[in-house]
Amino acid sequence: MNSGYIHSTETFGLVDGPGVRFVVFFSGCAMRCNFCHNPDTWQLKSGTPTTADELIKKALRCKPYWGGKGGITASGGEPLLQMDFLTEFLQKAHENGIHTTIDTAGQPFAREEPFFSKFCRLMEYTDLVILDIKHIDNAEHKKITGKENTNILDMAKYLSDIKKPVWLRHVLVPQYSDNDKYLIRLRDFIDTLDNVERVEVLPYHNLGVSKYEKLGIDYKLKDISPPDKERISNANKILETSKYPLNAKD
């Protein structure tokens, strides 16, 4: 039995997949997104060691509130960094008839072994992937996250190839991703995928600044204000978010 490092859980998540979700925030992330509002999840072993059985037991207490659409969402941090534990956890969820979602930025993805075989097995127990594409341009992605995006876009293509349902999310950051040229490129990329059920524009916010101050981390976007309604509307128009039926309220 594997143990994982868990930052926290949420028993009544409403924005992390269909219906009401039991959300598990995994510790550890290799990216350092300038706009991350959970820097307290970056360090893997800062979380609480937990077994899959302990998590499932906790989740099952909430199952009566899920209705027909809800389930479990593995978020983070970056849950793919704890692949073995994540797979065991979602396998147990499936054994209990629970819908499973992974909310990921895709950064650990690789077609090399041993990662790829483990990822393929994980997909057997994953009903939905929420994939956060931070920036469509590789160089700009590296500036804002510290990592390249080539393997992340490759993961999106692989999920399309295997027809795994995906919701795509994109954080709209003024002076970074809020640029029509990049938004058009992102839309063109999304149009190459056959499995996208939903596209969401997430307006940048600076609500996590206090966490940075508490952790002694420099917040690099302190001079950036959230996008206004016009720019949010513009991004939704370019990305054609309205054409996806699941963008209607669940």
Image: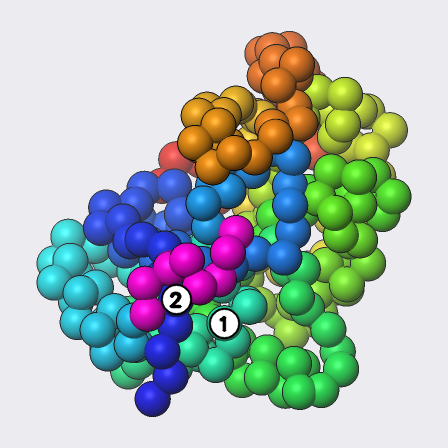
- Circles 2 and 1 in contact, beta carbons < 8 Å: yes
Image location of residue 140, percent across then percent down: 83, 39
Q: Residue at x 31, y 53 (%)?
A: 8
Left or right of residue 80, residue 237 in this image: right
Query: Which quadrant of the view contains residue 200?
Result: top right
Residue 237 in view in this figure? no
Task: Name the kind of residue labelled 2 in the image.
Answer: Tyr
Magenta region: which residues?
Answer: 42-49
Give the distance between the C-alpha atoms of the residues marked 2 and 1, in whole angstroms.
8 Å
Residue 13 in view in this figure? yes
- Compared to residue 190, the image places residue 223 above or below, namely above
Looking at the picture, tell me which residue is in the foreground, 243 or 53: 53
Is residue 79 covered in magenta? no
Q: Residue at x 36, y 55 (%)?
A: 7
Task: Point out the image quarter for the C terminus.
Answer: top left
* Farthest-out residue, front: 216
Query: Which quadrant of the view contains residue 211?
Result: top left
Q: Residue at x 48, y 62 (%)?
A: 44
| Few, some or many residues within 10 Å of mark 2 (<14, 14–19, 20+) | many
Left or right of residue 242, residue 58 in this image: left
Q: Residue at x 64, y 45 (%)?
A: 32
Query: Which quadrant of the view contains residue 175?
Result: top right
Left or right of residue 53, residue 209 in this image: right
- Residue 82 has which mark? 1
| Few, some or many residues within 10 Å of mark 1 (<14, 14–19, 20+) | some
- Residue 5 has which mark? 2
Task: Name the kind of residue labelled 1 in the image.
Answer: Gln
Q: Which color scheme did the rendering employ for the protein? A: rainbow
- Compared to residue 205, the image places residue 169 above or below, namely below
